[in-house]
């Protein structure tokens, strides 16, 4: 059981880093630091969108943006860490 919890914890950690990368890339695109016409930036952006958006979309319907700031990635990261800690506490 320990190896399954370790695997799930690692998957959660990787997903958290993907959420952080998605948020940072969206800021870089919004402030015109990187250009979406670049194929690499476009490919990375599409990948991160396809990975993170299915989980963020339902949260965005429930949680409104605060002053134009989307806080759903932060809330999702907190929820994922909470689930990870619960796994370690109750499954081990």
Image (tube, rainbow, N blue to C red):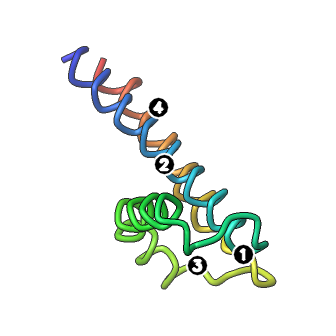
According to the image, label 1 marks what residue?
Answer: 30
With 88 as the anchor, is 74 left or right in this view?
Answer: right
Q: Give how far apart the Cα atoms at labels 2 and 4 are.
A: 19 Å
Secondary structure of residue under mark 1: helix
According to the image, label 3 marks what residue?
Answer: 63
Check if mark 3's residue and mark 1's residue have beta carbons within 8 Å: no
According to the image, label 4 marks what residue?
Answer: 85
Considering depth in this image, is 34 or 25 the residue closer to the camera? 34
Check if mark 2's residue and mark 4's residue have beta carbons within 8 Å: no
**Quadrant that contains the N terminus:** top left
N-terminal of the pair, mark 3 or mark 1, is: 1
Using a 10 Å C-alpha cutoff, classify the residue at mark 1 as few (fewer than 14 neighbours), some (14 to 19) or many (20 or more): few
Q: Residue at x 64, y 70 (%)?
A: 35
Q: Give how far apart the Cα atoms at labels 3 and 1 are.
A: 21 Å
N-terminal of the pair, mark 1 or mark 2, is: 2
Q: Give how far apart the Cα atoms at labels 1 and 2 are.
A: 18 Å
Give the foreground label among 4 and 1.
1
């Amino acid at each position: 059981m320990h190896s399954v919890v370790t695997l799930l914890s690692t998957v959660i950690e990787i997903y958290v880093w993907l959420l952080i990368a998605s948020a940072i890339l969206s800021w870089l695109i919004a402030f015109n630091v990187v250009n979406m016409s670049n194929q690499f930036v476009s490919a990375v952006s599409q990948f991160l969108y396809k990975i993170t958006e299915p989980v963020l979309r339902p949260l965005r319907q429930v949680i409104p943006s605060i002053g134009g700031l989307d806080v759903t990635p932060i809330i999702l990261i907190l929820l994922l860490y909470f689930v990870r800690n619960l796994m370690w506490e109750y499954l081990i």
